Image (tube, coloured by chain):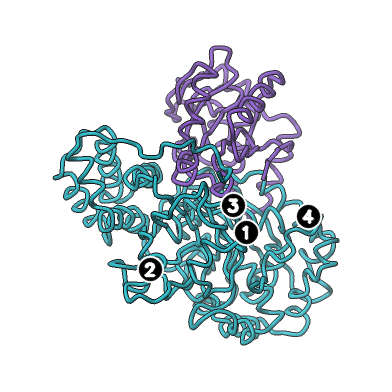
């Protein structure tokens, strides 16, 4: 069993209440940070920990914090990105729903480190009921003197509130999120300036993912160096993985970074193997945006080494033979899955979610969906495969925000690794969904 | 004012005068506004639109958007441009219960298409349509963050997960017999995780 730092108490009855959460050591990081550490010391520990942003980009959190501008007399903000929308990802929801105080605690400790006196949790609108759970936790924290003026008798004060979004994937991009938090359309901003200089209402702002902020608590408690001992190389600590698709045990797993992919898929501790006794065909390892890999490349690198659940190992070989850890949205597909149709669901998603600001993304995502639809209708030709490739290559790197890449990469990877499937449909002039068995039947035969 | 909002529905001056939050909803709106610094009340727009949608029949008419603009002291077009951007805001009338079936990757892999077909048959409507009695509107949705418990559908605040035909039938029959409007803002959410 690997160590768990974030959701080790998820099965404790009533862990969502302040009383039970505190009885299990909750809010210790607030006590420790506010009473025995300076804000810079907290940041220093986060730097030492090697913690990397858990939303998908994997940028070092301590470094992001150290970029925060601190002009006199200007408020600074910490905004939590709880707009979890990357297909295949549901870990933040799990954490917030089961242990809401873990996020509230992380928000207090992190806000203290950044010198923010007002912080927001921006949560996707569909998670409205989760916002209720968070609001309940926040009001308990206020009543216990953990939020508000002079927290725990110190001279540090913090107000924290939740804002719900309106159903837009793009608001998970940090500048679009800030636009939305300001009551506008979620159109990403051109960077620079980065939020660390001009973020919410033009003030210096740090935007961090839910899991990142929650991880600050164990880092403060155990110390950054100790945290960095978990994992391998630059992939330190633990990571929440959302496992879904054709596996026996879908769900959220906290792993020590470095677990072999094969173990993660097949061991009883994690996914428990492919359901209905089927064989593995492909995996999308880090949310819909990252390249899909066929069995042989997800279990082993091109060099033949076992592929590990780390930022480095998953990206080994670049996009030719590798992928990314991303958000940890781990989608598993069995041998009966049509890669073309799965890709269609991704492309339809990106077309729906493009904000429309940049032409390559606004138009390109629509074209890709339309062409993939031709494959499903059996009207596509072999030239359409080249056309798809051409379009995706003209989106990547030509947009304000990474949604363009996110839409292009899955198309490129599906063609790279599963071109035969496209060609076959084009040649036969018909699409046969090879998933014959009842997909609603989850029980292992 | 008023005619500045160009929705898909015509603006009705007489209806506009009838639009007003009740005391409880107004108190909620004031609490939301108080979360932002002085002068930044526009930030309250998304949460306030959710309250408005729930209060005024499950959709945002031009009159309702005009009213929200007046409360937040912003122009009606600022409300419309936001309401039209975000998927969760309905700019046309919908049924009392909007059924949103997730159709992205993991849900598709686990049979979302069969769930959609089942509901279409059961309610005798297609995706995007509303039943004649005004009870249900059927929609498909993009990833709702329920991939490990796929397939799933959202109705108002509730997530219904690990769906089977039987589970769908039970939920929809129950909602039909209760007959009330279901909103994202409902407190009696029933998630089945």
Tell which tag, 4 or 3, sits nearer the viewer. Answer: 3
Q: Which chain is mark 1 on?
A: A
Tell which tag, 1 or 3, sits nearer the viewer. Answer: 3
Of the pair A342 and B189, the residue shown nearer to us = A342
**Quadrant in the picture for the N terminus of chain A:** bottom right
Residue B113, percent across and down? 45, 33
Q: Name the disc covering residue A120, or none.
A: 1
Instruction: Look at mark 3 in the image and give the residue it sits on.
Output: A123
**Secondary structure of the residue carrying numbered label 1:** strand
Q: Earlier in the sequence, mark 1 or mark 4?
A: 1
- Measured in 3D between alpha carbons, the distance from the residue under mark 1 to the one under mark 3, in whole angstroms, is 9 Å
Q: Name the disc covering residue A142, or none.
A: none
- Measured in 3D between alpha carbons, the distance from the residue under mark 2 to the one under mark 4, in whole angstroms, is 36 Å
Residue depicted at 68% across the width and 79% down the height: A220
Residue B53, percent across and down? 60, 31
Q: Earlier in the sequence, mark 2 or mark 3?
A: 3
Residue B89, percent across and down? 52, 35
Q: In the figure, residue B153 lies in which quadrant?
A: top right
Q: In this structure image, what is the colour of chain B? A: purple
């Amino acid at each position: 069993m690997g160590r768990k730092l974030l959701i080790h108490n998820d099965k404790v009855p009533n862990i969502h209440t302040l009383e039970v959460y505190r009885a299990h050591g909750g809010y210790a990081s607030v006590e420790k940070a506010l009473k025995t550490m300076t804000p810079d010391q907290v940041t220093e520990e986060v730097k030492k920990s090697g913690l990397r942003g858990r939303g998908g980009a994997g940028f070092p959190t301590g470094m992001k914090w150290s970029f925060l501008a601190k002009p006199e007399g200007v408020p600074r903000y910490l905004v939590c990105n709880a707009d979890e929308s990357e297909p295949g990802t549901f870990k933040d929801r799990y954490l917030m729903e089961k242990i809401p105080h873990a996020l509230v605690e992380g928000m207090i400790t992190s806000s203290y480190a950044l010198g923010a006196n007002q912080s927001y949790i921006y949560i996707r609108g569909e998670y409205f009921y989760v916002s209720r759970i968070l609001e309940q936790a926040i009001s308990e924290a206020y009543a216990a003197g953990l939020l508000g003026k002079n927290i725990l008798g110190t001279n540090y004060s913090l107000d924290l509130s939740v804002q719900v979004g309106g159903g837009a994937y793009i608001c998970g991009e940090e500048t679009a999120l800030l636009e939305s938090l300001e009551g506008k359309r979620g159109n990403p901003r051109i960077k620079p300036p980065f939020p660390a200089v001009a973020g919410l209402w033009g003030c210096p702002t740090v935007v961090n993912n839910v899991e990142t902020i929650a991880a600050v608590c164990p880092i403060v408690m155990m110390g950054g160096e100790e945290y960095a001992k978990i994992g391998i190389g630059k992939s330190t600590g633990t990571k929440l993985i959302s496992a879904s698709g054709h596996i026996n045990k879908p769900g959220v797993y906290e792993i020590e970074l470095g677990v072999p992919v094969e173990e993660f898929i097949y061991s009883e501790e994690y996914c428990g193997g492919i359901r209905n006794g089927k064989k593995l065909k492909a995996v999308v390892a880090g949310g819909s945006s990252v390249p899909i890999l066929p069995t042989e490349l997800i279990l082993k690198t091109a060099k033949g080494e076992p592929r590990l659940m780390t930022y480095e190992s998953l990206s080994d070989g670049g996009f030719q033979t590798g992928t990314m850890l991303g958000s940890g949205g781990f989608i598993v597909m069995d041998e009966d899955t049509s890669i073309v149709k799965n890709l269609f669901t991704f492309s339809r998603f990106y077309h729906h979610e493009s904000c429309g600001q940049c032409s390559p993304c606004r138009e390109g995502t629509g074209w890709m969906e339309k062409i993939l639809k031709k494959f499903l209708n059996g009207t596509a030709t072999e030239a359409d495969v080249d056309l798809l490739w051409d379009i995706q290559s003209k989106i990547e790197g030509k947009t304000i925000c990474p949604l363009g890449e996110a839409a292009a990469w899955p198309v490129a990877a599906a063609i790279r690794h599963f071109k035969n499937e496209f060609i076959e449909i084009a040649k036969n002039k018909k699409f046969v969904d090879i998933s014959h068995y009842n997909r609603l039947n989850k029980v292992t035969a | 004012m008023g005619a500045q909002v160009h929705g898909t529905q015509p603006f009705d001056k007489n209806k506009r005068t009838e639009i007003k939050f009740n005391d409880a909803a107004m108190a909620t709106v004031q609490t939301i506004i108080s979360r932002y610094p002085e002068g930044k009340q526009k930030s309250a727009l998304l949460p306030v639109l959710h309250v408005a949608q729930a209060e005024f029949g499950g959709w945002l008419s031009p009159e309702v958007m005009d009213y929200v603009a007046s409360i937040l002291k912003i122009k009606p077009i600022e409300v419309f441009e936001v309401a039209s951007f975000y998927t969760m805001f309905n700019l046309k009338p919908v049924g009392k219960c909007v059924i949103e079936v997730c159709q992205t990757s993991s849900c598709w892999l686990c049979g979302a298409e069969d769930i959609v077909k089942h509901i279409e048959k059961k309610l005798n409507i297609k995706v995007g349509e509303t039943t004649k009695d005004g009870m249900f509107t059927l929609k498909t949705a993009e990833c709702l963050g329920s991939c490990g418990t796929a397939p799933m559908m959202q109705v108002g605040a509730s997530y219904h997960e690990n769906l089977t035909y039987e589970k769908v039938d039970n939920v929809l029959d129950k909602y039909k017999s209760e007959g009330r409007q279901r909103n994202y803002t409902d407190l009696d959410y029933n998630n089945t995780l």
